[in-house]
Image (cartoon, rainbow, N blue to C red):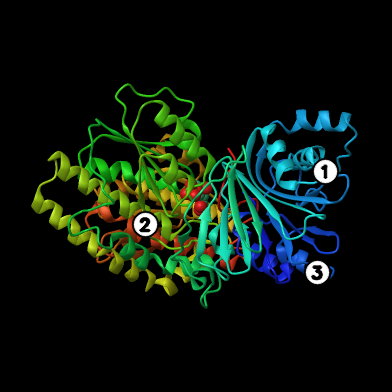
Amino acid sequence: MCGIIGYAGRREALPILLDGLKRLEYRGYDSAGVAIVGSALQVAKDKGFIADLEAHLPAMHGTTGLAHTRWATHGAPSKVNAHPHTDCTGKIALAHNGIIENYSGLRERLEEQGHVFRTETDTESLVHLIEAHYRGDLEAAVREALQEVRGSYAIAVVHADEPGRVIGARNESPLVVGLAPDETFLASDVPALLKHTDKVVYVMDKEMVVLTPEGAALRDLQGKTVQREPQRITWNLEDAEKGGFEHFMLKEIHETPKAIQETLLGRLANLEVDGFRAEDFGSVKLVACGTSYHAALVGKYIIEEIAKVPASAELASEYRYTQGAADRPLVILLSQSGETADTLGAAREARRRGCKTLAITNVTGSSLARETDKTIYTRAGLEIGVAATKTFVAQLIVLYLIALRMGLDRGTLGYEEAERLKDELRSLPRAALAVLDEEDAIRDLAASYGKEARDAYYLGRHVNYPVAMEGALKLKEISYVHAEAYAAGELKHGPLALITKDTPIIAIAVDDPTYEKMRSNLGEVAARGARILAVGTEGDRELPKYVDDVIPVPRLPWVFSPVPVSVALMLFAYHAARLRGCPIDKPRNLAKSVTVE
Ligand code: F6R
């Protein structure tokens, strides 16, 4: 969580830092701050969005600096708790993403030594610790301080007496360095750098970096030089702009067909999925958080149906605390960002249990890609809206590819059947596009069902039960409507008590193995007076007899139906939230990348 950026160059640092910081705002937006080294150290911070900070900034001049946008963990979101934090001398400023786990012990000791703390944050202990070690060399002081720190961090540090230098370090929180002639940058994520350079070096755990206008020097925590070749980034600045859409979320929903196409590109003909082969494992365990967990749940159906391999899904935050099965499944970890702390923890636990691990992530060079045996990339492009959209669908596409490969490798899927499924996969961008063409009608339905609702219930069965869960998550996180998903067959075992004429029902009733049963469940709901909006298969003449309205999606073999259905539910949630006037790309209390457990 939180976004940090640092700059050492020859231009005025402030506009560069603010522009970069805005491109990291998806990582947290409850407060923000900036520190510039000019003739002295100048610090400004405020509660709220970066725009609030910018509106009240004094003139700040200097060519070295750092900035931070916060998602609070320790200490309420407030001006005083906002980063950067400074030491007692007011000469050192520090921005931090992560959690210093042993902060209270450090704080106690430093207070005994006379350091004066002003905030409730874990981070402040680190800046005082650096001060305690400072003897005229910031790099050495940071290095010594970090030996005493337990926890996760990506930091940027400057000192008033050392203009032209920014010290960075990382452990379990992302940090990337940008290289350009006469200037260097560091940031939590690539979008902050795209305007200035496509040449980057990823900082790894327990490494430090010293930025100067001339370049960036990487070292380990013992001070030993680390050599690492820079990489070229393929995302461009346009990817980080809204491109005429009102919100990133809408732009990204519209990019779903492209995300599918790109993720399939070059992989279908020979089913060459980044060298993946089904090795000697008896089962598959899919592990993830949030939206990626819903993709994992869909993945269970995909893998069992196509490859006939037993599969199960588990939340990453729970996986670590359960007993491993004796049979050592292949553990597939899904994470858009590749930085989710719970998922990284699960990856480590899976390896500790002796399991082979496979990552599915959208971010090249992310921590998850480094912590697993093998990585398959979704190629959805940059996703900035806090609510995951196109990347969810791209995760499903990778799961289809994996299932096909597994089925062929194990002989559970015949060649002809595989060819037929491949053709269906090729048709998915068109299917997603067909749903996008229904946007106007979906917006009207969102006005009718979602604008005034206080609660909404999503119903699905079988492969579309997790899709209903994902639909409900989208609605609740961006529109703040209380939304729950139920497996429709479970309704009569309790939740039916909640259904009244005022509770809109959003049901997935496409042509899948439970369609008939689903229709009976909808009858039970209709009998309680609820209004029902169904996502159904186009051309289905029976369904309208059971429900009030239908969003039609193209007819596909059931295993692929989650793709168009998801697009319909994303659009529904988006328009409901928009009509309610919600801050769609920055929902309250959330952040895109959750790097704390
Ligand atoms: C919801 C959403 C979150 C993420 C979750 C995991 O729209 O985006 O639930 O899915 O925080 O993030 P990743 O996939 O980056 O591990």
> Which circle marks residue 119 in the picture?
1
Please report the residue visible at 76 percent of the width from the left and 52 percent of the height from the top.
84
| The quarter of the displayed image where residue 171 is located | top right
Please report the residue visible at 56 percent of the width from the left and 49 percent of the height from the top.
174
**Image location of residue 26, percent across then percent down:** 60, 58
- Mark 1 or mark 3, earlier in chain: 3
> Which circle marks residue 61 in the picture?
3
Q: How many angstroms separate mark 1 from mark 3 (CA)? A: 26 Å
Q: How many angstroms separate mark 2 from mark 3 (CA)? A: 44 Å
- Mark 2 or mark 3, earlier in chain: 3
Q: Nearer the viewer, residue 456 or 88?
A: 88
Left or right of residue 482, residue 423 in this image: left
**Image location of residue 322, percent across then percent down:** 45, 25
The amino acid at mark 3 is His
Q: Is residue 452 above or below residue 276?
A: below
> Which circle marks residue 394 in the picture?
2
The amino acid at mark 1 is Thr
Q: Nearer the viewer, residue 214 or 129?
A: 214
- Residue that extends furthest to the bottom in the rendered view of this protein: 244
- Mark 2 or 3, closer to the camera: 3
- Mark 2 or mark 1, earlier in chain: 1
Please report the residue visible at 46 percent of the width from the left and 63 percent of the height from the top.
233
Q: Is residue 527 above or below residue 256?
A: above
